[in-house]
Amino acid sequence: MRGKVERYLLDKISSEGCIHITLVDPDKSSSMNCSTIAKMAEEGGTSAIMVGGSTLYAKEDLDEAVLSIKENVKVPIILFPNGPVGISKHADAIWFMSLLNSSNTYWIVDAQALSAPLVKRYQLEALPMGYIIAGEGCVAGHVGQARLINYKHPELAVGYGMAAEQLGMRFVYLEAGSGAESPIPVSMINAVKKHIGVPLIVGGGLRDPKSALNAKQAGADIVVTGTLVEEEREVKDKISEIVSALNEKR
């Protein structure tokens, strides 16, 4: 059964074609700064706020950030966890994700087994997602011990994407890594999208309206930006420009 946040995302995708989500990392910004960034992003037109990061270690920082953000925004707050420490009872939902191309079963299923009781206890809405890291991978690839998929081999990403859907996951996320020099190429996005029937999320290396629009036109249903807002400068304008580009007709 789909929950409130999932229905919200699907409805937004259905009506807008491709939506934007802002990633806020409590490990890189104070709770107050996270709240400010989230508020400006919401004013810029972002559809939801993701909270988390690959190197988050202090649960207290996460709770403070989520509570601070919740006081200032109306859009859903979705956790983007790096394991059990990345779970806060104050969020609206959680990407319950499996790093499918990890070389370590911890990131494929063990972390999820440890996290599931908390997710249920906190009554968080779980959004099942297959997570696939390609290209540079950056910190996410290193921490998650990913067998990085070379951009020259989109067929490998296609296989993981299809596996995610057939395992019952309702979202697929193609990740280049936060701060990646090169985003997921349109050829890989297009190839994966052609073979799956669930929403496709694309993130990493998307720094401007053009790269976000390229991802949309290749088949992305959701684009995620994080590094773009970390400096806290002109966040509203930056997000607004990207959202405007995504709203352009195909």
Image: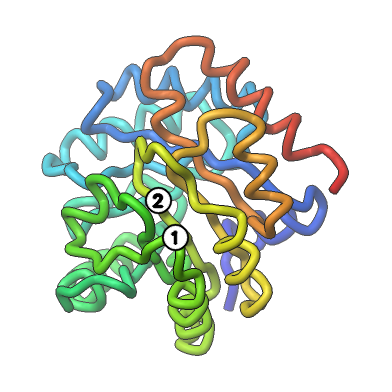
Q: Residue at x 27, y 46 (%)?
A: 138
Query: Could you tell me which quadrant the N terminus lies in?
Result: bottom right
Q: Is residue 224 left or right of residue 83?
A: right
Name the residue type under label 1. Answer: Tyr
In the picture of the structure, the residue carrying the numbered disc 2 is 176
In the picture of the structure, the residue carrying the numbered disc 1 is 151
Using the image as rendered, state which of residue 75 and residue 210 is in the foreground. Answer: 210
Q: Answer yes or no: is residue 128 visible.
A: no
Q: Quadrant of residue 109?
A: bottom left
Where does residue 68 sit, x and y in percent of width and height? Answer: 36, 27
In the rendered image, the residue lying farthest to the right is 249
Using the image as rendered, state which of residue 200 and residue 147 is in the foreground. Answer: 147
Where does residue 69 sit, x and y in percent of width and height? Answer: 42, 29
Q: Earlier in the sequence, mark 2 or mark 1?
A: 1
Q: Residue at x 21, y 32 (%)?
A: 27
Q: Residue at x 46, y 80 (%)?
A: 164
Where does residue 189 sit, x and y in percent of width and height? Answer: 59, 61
Q: Secondary structure at mark 2?
A: loop
Q: Are marks 2 and 1 in contact (CB under 8 Å)?
A: no
Name the residue type under label 2. Answer: Ala
Q: Residue at x 40, y 47 (%)?
A: 91
Q: CA distance from mark 2 to mark 1?
A: 10 Å
Question: Vertically, is 214 above or below 194?
Answer: above
In the rendered image, the residue lying farthest to the top is 233
Q: Is residue 204 left or right of residue 206?
A: left
Using the image as rendered, state which of residue 58 and residue 72 is in the foreground. Answer: 58
Where does residue 130 sit, x and y in percent of width and height? Answer: 43, 71
